[in-house]
Image: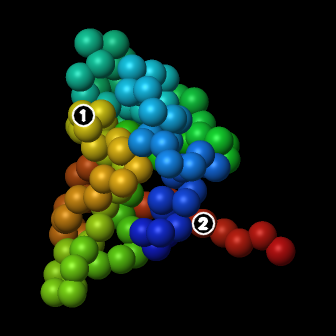
Amino acid sequence: MLAENEWVFTARGGLIEKKYVWGNDESVARDYANYTGIDGKDKWGYCTLVGSFKPNGYGLYDMSGNSWELCQNWYDSSQRYHVFRGGSWGSSAYYFSVDRRIIAHRNDAELSGFRCVAGLK
């Protein structure tokens, strides 16, 4: 599971000061993300297979849409809620901003997932 700052860095895919993982143009979101509100063009209905949409600049898939990503960080000092990032298949493009974060219980798993990360030597 990524720390929140690691998620932001990897989601940006090398882009600096851009709103989304692909840049600033929300109108191309359907090329990069599985989400609700794409005018009936969603052939999946729920989660898709990884790699069904274009990757970001680092070659990572589904950094926006498909599944909220649970981050390692607590949302606040109460340590009751975690940070989730990236939006899901049930989200609108509003949640795809790289800076957008939501609060959720770790057990709110119906729309969430986590990214497995391995270090290279």
Q: Tell me if residue 75 comes above or below residue 16 in the rendering.
A: below
Q: Position of residue 61 (x, y in %)?
A: 56, 42
Residue located beneath label 1 in the image: 92
Q: CA distance from mark 1 to mark 2?
A: 27 Å
Query: Foreground residue, 69 or 75?
Result: 75
The residue identified by callout 2 is: 117
Q: Residue at x 29, y 58 (%)?
A: 101
Taking the view exactly as shown, the residue that stands out farthest to the front is 17
Q: What residue lies at 45% left-to-right and 33% top-to-bottom?
A: 24
Residue 33 in sight here? yes
Identify the mark at residue 67; answer none if there is no mark. none
Left or right? Give the position of 78 relative to 91: left
Q: Give how far across and how far down residue 120 sits, in percent.
A: 78, 70
- Residue 7 in percent (x, y) is at 49, 62
Q: Residue furthest right?
A: 121
Q: Amino acid at mark 2?
A: Val
For the residue labelled by badge 2, is the local secondary structure a helix, a strand or a loop? loop
Do the residues bearing badges 1 and 2 touch, measured as CB atoms within 8 Å? Answer: no
Residue 90 vs residue 29: left or right?
left
Q: Quadrant of the C terminus?
A: bottom right
